[in-house]
Image: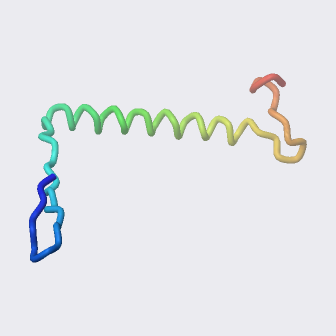
Amino acid sequence: MTFLKVGSIMVVEKIKFKTNKVNKKELEEFKAHSKLMDEKMEAIIERYKTSWDTSKKTWKKGMGNA
């Protein structure tokens, strides 16, 4: 931090934000990984939705502890 003196007041000089340098290859790998994880998560959510019996509020046969 640096201070500037303006009249009789000390003011803190604003520090500009510096972005991180991102490697394009790493960024593409991260995007591919994120997409894969999203697909897996959607598949798991769909499985749980189809395996839950809303009327009995329990798992259907073959899912969970049922």
Residue 25 in the image, given as x and y percentages of width and height: 15, 32
**On the picture, is 52 further left or further right than 28?**
right
**On the picture, is 44 further left or further right than 53?**
left
User: Farthest residue in the bottom direction?
Assistant: 7
Residue 28 in the image, given as x and y percentages of width and height: 21, 36
Q: Quadrant of residue 20?
A: top left
The residue at the point 12 percent across, 40 percent down is: 21
Quarter occupied by the C terminus: top right
Residue 43 in the image, given as x and y percentages of width and height: 55, 36
Q: Nearer the viewer, residue 2 or 45?
A: 2
The residue at the point 81 percent across, 22 percent down is: 65
Residue 54 in the image, given as x and y percentages of width and height: 82, 46
Q: Quadrant of residue 58?
A: top right
**On the picture, is 43 further left or further right than 13?**
right
User: Farthest residue in the front direction?
Assistant: 8
The residue at the point 60 percent across, 39 percent down is: 45
The residue at the point 88 percent across, 47 percent down is: 55
Q: Nearer the viewer, residue 19 or 29?
A: 19
